[in-house]
């Protein structure tokens, strides 16, 4: 599972964890529709910013990789 640094103000950890689990399952799937959905979702998703959340630059980098079709 992808791990991100926890920072003072960052993306909501529960939202990111849920997205990462689904995206990783979809992007590694042999089904083209699931891969396409993961790529599109990675471009459209947004997360709430909270105290003690995940590092925004690290999560954004992960999202860019998924949008390009790369797995974890």
Image (cartoon, grey):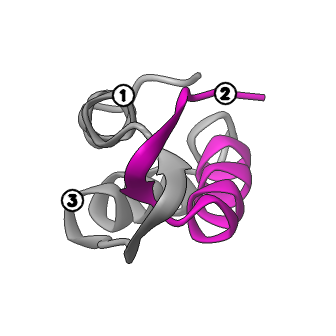
At 39% across and 53% down in the image, what residue appears?
Answer: 10
Residue hosting label 2: 2
Residue 31 is tagged as none
Which residue is found at the position 48% from the left and 63% from the top? 51
Task: Tell me which segment is drawn in magenta.
Answer: 1-26
Q: Position of residue 52 (x, y in %)?
A: 55, 53
- The alpha-carbon separation of the residues under discs 2 and 1 comes to 10 Å
Judged from the image, the secondary structure of the residue bearing numbered disc 1 is helix
Q: Verify CB contact (< 8 Å) between mark 3 and mark 1.
A: no
Residue at screen point 42% across, 23% down: 70
Q: Nearer the viewer, residue 33 or 67?
A: 67
- Compared with 33, 26 (above or below) is above
Name the quadrant of the C terminus: top right
In the shown orientation, is residue 58 left or right of residue 21? left
Q: Residue at x 30, y 73 (%)?
A: 46
State which quadrant residue 2 falls in: top right
Q: Is residue 16 magenta?
A: yes
Q: Could you tell me how many numbered marks the image carries?
A: 3
Rate crowding at label 2 as few (under 14), some (14 to 19) or many (20 or more) other CA atoms within 10 Å: few
Horizontal side of residue 64 vs 66, given as left or right = left
Q: Residue at label 1? A: 58
Residue 34, picture quadrant: bottom right
The image quadrant that residue 62 belongs to is top left
In front: mark 3 or mark 1? Answer: 1
* Screen quadrant of the N terminus: top right
Question: Where does the image place residue 26, in percent across and percent down from the top left?
Answer: 64, 51
Q: Position of residue 28 (x, y in %)?
A: 66, 34
- The residue singled out by tag 3 in the image is 43
Residue 21 drawn at (x, y percent): 73, 52
**Cα–Cα gap, marks 3 and 2:** 18 Å
């Amino acid at each position: 599972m992808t791990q991100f640094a926890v920072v003072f103000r960052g993306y909501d950890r529960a939202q990111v964890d849920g997205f990462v689990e689904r995206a990783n399952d979809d992007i590694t799937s042999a089904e083209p529709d699931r891969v396409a959905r993961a790529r599109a979702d990675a471009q459209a998703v947004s997360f709430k910013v909270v105290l003690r959340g995940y590092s925004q630059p690290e999560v954004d980098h992960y999202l860019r990789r998924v949008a390009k079709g790369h797995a974890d």
